[in-house]
Image: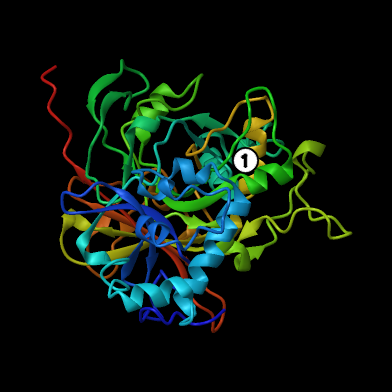
Amino acid sequence: MAECTLVKVDPKSDFSVANLPFGIYSVGDGTPQVGVAIGDRVLDMSALADAGLFKHIAALDGAVFSRPYLNDYMALGRPVWQEVRRALLDFLTNTDNSVRRRLSDNGTLGSGVLVPMASVEMHLPARIGDYTDFYASREHATNVGAMFRGKDNALMPNWTHLPVGYHGRASSVVVSGTPLHRPNGQRRPDPTTAPVFGPSVRLDYELEMGFFVGPGNDLGTPLTMRQAEDSIFGAVLLNDWSARDIQAWEYVPLGPFLGKNFGTTVSPWVVTMEALEPFRVAQPVQDPQPLPYLCDATAADGKGPPSAGYDIQLEVHLQAGGDGDFHLLTKSNLKHMYWSLRQQLMHHAVSGCNMRPGDLCGTGTISGPTADSFGSMLELCWSGKRDIPLGESGLTRKFIEDGDVVRLTGFCQTPGGRRVGFGECTGQILPAKSLGF
């Protein structure tokens, strides 16, 4: 891939020319609209459309880039996404690009299409109609199961046969930087007495990734594995905040409720699956082999879907009380995920459930095989049995305290290659609101 010649991009930037993630931004009191990140700048996609950069793409109405959400663009499908990416790459790398030359000649190449990232406010990338959270990491499911059921019964009988998931709350998905209040709810600290009501005292993060659905499917019409692959627009970092004590009391028999629905944080830039293509790896071996509709192996003749795992390096840092240094708590990788993204989406739709553009799916906590790769504080402190040191500060945590800031980061990079990163997914926990009862 050629170098970006339009702007200088720091080699350490998450937003290299190999990335080109999509997001929704605004400047000042301006209307939110679609942008693409490159280095420390944001490309104004509406301005580029008006300049004619995409006029050769028959299926694309450039008006989709002036909207305050990506849903309409996500709905257009992979052929259009690929054409837009090619047009952007040529614009950024080719000094003879006709649109670039014309903008340069009339003096609008810089200020007309490039916005300093430091001056923008980021918004949710999509109007999220539905949000589903999966439980797709074997290491995480095993750890949690061993804590509460013992190692011999760690995994429920269905876990290795299907991607377990639950329907989350789309209305409380927030963009990175949005503070959240500690939730109130019922908990039962003493199993021999009645439950009590009040703020959660075991508030946790969950290191996840999320993916946004593109074209989707009609009600009653399942997706094939190939269609599921082609229906995923891109990925974000996702923090599935979890009130463990509220969740533990409420989740039987229907699953999480108040322990999860108070907030889910996502990073603002959606990294497209085209940008992640070079970082495909084999997913973990699935034993027993899934039922035929979920078989995800690459066909021996090369005609099957490509490898389903992705080598995305992930970290979680915590800043105590919202001040001072950030301390590394988790270092994991999406490649550990047992159930692939396309398996998750295909299983979701196999009943005939209609997935729609902008729907969000979370992967579930991404834990790896070693203690430092555990994707939640519940695992790191082993349900409160040990302290989690915050670097060399002398501070410790078992769970999140008021004022703490949790920051998720993630990136891909081959040796000597350009970095493809996700930016940050950050949130601060504020004290619970006093309800007076």
Nearest to the observer: residue 320 or residue 71: 71
* 307 to the left or right of 164: right
Which residue carries the number 1 mark? 344
Query: What's the residue type where badge 1 is placed?
Result: Gln
Residue found at the very far right of the displayed protein: 301
Image spot of residue 335 (x, y percent) = 60, 59
Please give the name of the residue rendered at 59% of the width and 36% of the height, measured from the top-left corner.
Answer: 216
Quadrant occupied by the N terminus: bottom right
Q: Quadrant of residue 421?
A: bottom left
* 159 to the left or right of 15: right
Nearest to the observer: residue 333 or residue 230: 230
* 144 to the left or right of 23: right
Nearest to the observer: residue 167 or residue 336: 167
Query: Vertical placement of 39 versus 356: above or below?
Result: below
The answer to whether residue 162 shows anywhere in this view is: yes
Query: Vertical placement of 134 versus 27: above or below?
Result: above
